[in-house]
Image (cartoon, grey):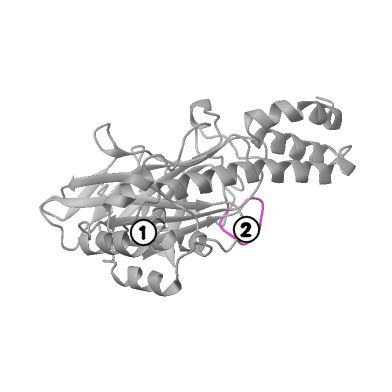
Amino acid sequence: MPASVLSVNGKLRSLYDRATVTEPRASGYTDLDIGRPLIVQYLYFFLRHKSPEKKNELMISSFMKTTETKQAAAEAINYFDNTARFDKNKELRISDFGAERYGHRLCYYTKSYLGEALYMTIKIMEIDKINKKLIEAIKKGIGTVGSLPVFAEFLPYAAGASVGVSLFGKIIDLFNKDYAIVQGHDLDLHFGLENVRRLQSGRIVCVPEQEEEYLLGGKYELTQDNKLIEVNSKTEYTDTSYFVIQVDAKPNKKLESFDYFLGAADLLKLTNRGGDSTELVHTVVDIFKGYNDSQAVCEIEELSFEADNEEVKKRIKALYKSMSNDVRILYKDRIKELTGS
């Protein structure tokens, strides 16, 4: 099983354990809880490429969902560099995204966590050149349906489009597959459940091509600057690619209006996925924002019958905090009635 392990002040341990069972939480991190913020972001990448070119079109993307649904999550681009250069050892390290390249460390942020599981997939790809045949096929075959999504992650949303199934098949057949520098890494994190990987604050080391047991037992540790090193030699682990994720519960108001998909659709148009997905991305995001508000209202009203229970009040407050600002203004009197504050 691909390795995903927790760092507690540099010491590696299984994510199946709670960080506070036998030793304190990593210094400087805030414990996660319902109603508190939740932030997930990247800290460091070590990438090994079997056959790099002189310049590589490197893209790191994330798929994140917190809903219990079979639908695939939309693709958010965290990093894109069309001139990435691997060194003579076929290695590339990313600790600073910088301002010149497209990207942002953030994978997920909510101002009020509700206790849901986080399902995450990370892809690190070398992007093929623009497929001109695909673009021409789209222009000729689709006509006025300009927002048809033709990259696989959005196909579930396109089921209702007025386009024949056979046309879908013809378009998909024209795809050039992206080349995975690192195999896709899945990470499911759960809150307050036993016998699953726990969602908890701290740093998580992800090594897609290594067994978890290999990293545990004290042979390796994580440095302050997020490098995985061998304890005795103090040299960095370079056998395979790896990356480090940070999870914390500190509030950051600047991230409340952060658009995970800003520019992503335009960037995806430049890759071999093709198509004009800008309209679709923004439509889906807007729908989910409204859906979140309505779901929160429905759940609060269901909980209202048990509002004298302190744990129920805590969840009602967390749900209210998760709403958009406009809906919160409209609903504030009802919340005061239920919680007394």
Q: Viewer-proximal residue, 8 or 201?
A: 201
Tag 2 residue: 68
In-image side of 145 versus 178 (left or right): right
Which numbered disc flags the more N-terminal residue, 2 or 1? 2
Mark 2 is surrounded, within 10 Å at the Cα level, by few (under 14), some (14 to 19) or many (20 or more) other residues, namely few
Q: Viewer-proximal residue, 33 or 183?
A: 183
Instruction: Give the residue drawn at x 37%, y 47%.
Output: 265
Q: CA distance from mark 2 to mark 1?
A: 36 Å
In the picture, the disc for residue 143 is 1
In-image side of 326 versus 110 (left or right): right
- Amino acid carrying mark 2 in the image: Glu
Q: In the rendered image, is residue 248 in sight? A: yes
- Amino acid carrying mark 1 in the image: Gly
Q: Position of residue 244 (x, y in %)?
A: 38, 47
Looking at the rendering, the stretch of residues picked out in magenta corresponds to 191-198
Q: Which secondary structure lies at badge 2?
A: loop
In the picture, the disc for residue 195 is none
| Quarter of the figure that contains the C terminus | top right
Q: In the rendered structure, does residue 86 fall within the stretch colored magenta?
A: no
Q: In the rendered structure, does residue 196 fall within the stretch colored magenta?
A: yes
Q: Residue 251, located in which quarter of the rendered image?
A: top right
Q: Position of residue 6 (x, y in %)?
A: 48, 50
Mark 2–mark 1 contact, CB under 8 Å?
A: no
Q: In the rendered image, is residue 231 in sight? A: no
Residue 121 against residue 11 in the figure, above or below: below
Q: Residue 176, located in which quarter of the rendered image?
A: bottom left
Q: Position of residue 88 (x, y in %)?
A: 10, 53
Q: Viewer-proximal residue, 140 or 341?
A: 140
Q: Position of residue 12 (x, y in %)?
A: 44, 51
| Quarter of the figure that contains the N terminus | bottom left
Residue 286 against residue 153 in the figure, above or below: above
Furthest residue to the front? 144
